[in-house]
Amino acid sequence: MNHTLPPTRDVPPRRQAQIRARLEQEVGRGRRAVRFAPLIAAGVATAAVIALVAVAAPWRPGGADTAAGPSSRSGYPTTAPPRTYSTAERPVIPNLSPERIAEIEQGCVDSTGIGGRAVLHQYLTDSIGTFALLYTENAMLSCTVDSPTMPYNAGFTAGLRVEWLPGEFAADGISAASGGNGGKPGYEGRLGYEMVAGRVSSKVARVTYAQGGQTAEATIANGTFVARIPRPADWGVPEGHGTGDVRAYDAQGRLLGTLDSMSRERCYMNPEYVIVFGNKEADPTTCLPAVSWRH
Amino acid sequence: MTTDDPDDRTLWSQAAAGSGPAFGVLFDRHAKAVYNHCFRLTASWAAAEDHLQNTFLVAWRKRDRLRLEHDSALPWLLAVATNVVRGDRRTVARRLRLFRRAPVETAVPDHADQVAERVDDQRRMAVLLAAVAELPRNEREALALCVWSGVSYADAASVLGIAEVSVRARVSKAKARLTRRLGAAPVVAVPALTLEDR
């Protein structure tokens, strides 16, 4: 058997010319034009990543009272190694002890059954209740804390490439819940809600969420955002519930991106030319650069 | 390269400052080596063409992050190419699985001799890659860089971010494993280091 290497060969001239033309096109865009040019549309993983699940169904074991269903094209791996954080890197959650944070992280991830290590990024209490937003290596967890029937109840969006943003923000989960949780015992009188949660780049200073004639300001912390619109206890998630309108702005009030401006066909690639969001079948040379997310 | 040609370090600094022509010269100078390196990682000339393009696009986008420490940009370009191949999920192992399932690429019935030669290249390379498929990835890549593409141990260590002794160890282990795997057959001939003028 011949184990020698095949001889080196020239690049076919026509192909070399094509590649050179492609490089010239890239070079002609100007210095750093691709990587750092302001993107017309801030990243929203809408179609590919967001799962809009309007939950009126009763609680199910291991599930969630509000479920943002898995949306990855590749399923949701549960065995990815947990990201480790140094003390300095960890998200800052005011008024919570490290022990309590650890309890929430463990409780929320256990309630999903997806495994892995979740890191708490936001913890807030509003008229709807207490909510925790967490991220694992590849999933977002939207976790209701201290609900009437269980201490932690998390929905999740899995299959995320959380180290990358498709622009300046990613709406990783949009969900809604009927008031009284659709009549589930123990939830009588509880408010319904509509919400969106996701990640933002450091440029984003403000996120708004408009849905059903109301607009909510998102809380932004630790590279994430959460916007919730409370609904009456007798409110039910309407048929054909839409995603609403999510907008991200910088500190000067400039619009960085919207949910609507994203196309299913748009794609984003990382510096290694791997498509991390959007149409995985696209030619990488047509993709926009993804923005690093470092929280 | 004539004595009047600027060296890679000069060209790279110009490219980092935004000079497209300088980058074009670097492309012309190293395209063949990168192309052949990608072929050796994929056993497909067609895939190598795609990876060649992607390698230089990535290189352009990363140009201002790199300060050339050596006279040649080639070691770094080959490392980028390796990452492109890996990142594109066309790892050696994956490609080999593909090759085991699928016939070798159908040749375009044109330029018959040349096409036949290239198809034969792919068959031979697929056999070689089959032999190295069981190696750990870091050994495969060190082998491809240092043995197949002729990058020095020092340059490979630099671009891989590891110690030179580690590169030597990886290559040595790879050769030993291949020798065991291939029995008495010669391991992998070191190609003549005349890939390009650098």
Image (cartoon, rainbow, N blue to C red):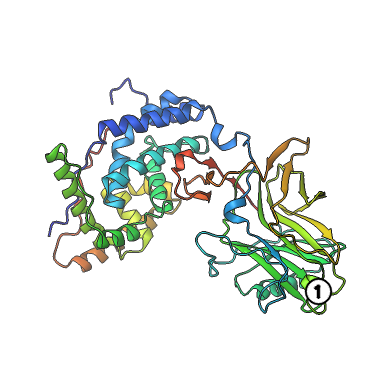
Task: Identify the secondary structure beneath mark 1.
Answer: loop
Position of residue A27 relative to residue A232, above or below, is above
User: Residue tagged by mark 1?
Assistant: A146
Q: Quadrant of residue A63?
A: bottom right
Residue A180 location (% of width, % of height): 82, 71
Q: Residue at x 46, y 51 (%)?
A: B161
Q: Nearer the viewer, residue B169 or A59?
A: A59
| Furthest residue toward front | A239
Q: Nearer the viewer, residue A254 or B175?
A: A254
Residue B3 location (% of width, % of height): 30, 22
Query: Does the rendering let one see residue B151?
Result: no
Position of residue A263 relative to residue A26, above or below, is below
Circle 1 residues within 10 Å: few <14, some 14–19, many ≥20: few
Q: Residue at x 79, y 74 (%)?
A: A183
For disc 1, the chain is A
Quadrant for the C terminus of chain B in the image: top left
* Lateral position of residue B75 relative to residue A80, left or right: left
Position of residue B95 relative to residue A234, above or below, is above
Residue A124 location (% of width, % of height): 82, 62
Residue A119 location (% of width, % of height): 68, 64
Q: Residue at x 20, y 46 (%)?
A: B191
Quadrant for the N terminus of chain B in the image: top left
* Lateral position of residue B93 relative to residue A157, left or right: left
- What amino acid does circle 1 point to? Asp
Q: Nearer the viewer, residue B36 or A221?
A: A221
Position of residue A280 relative to residue B109, above or below, is below
* Lateral position of residue B62 relative to residue B149, left or right: right
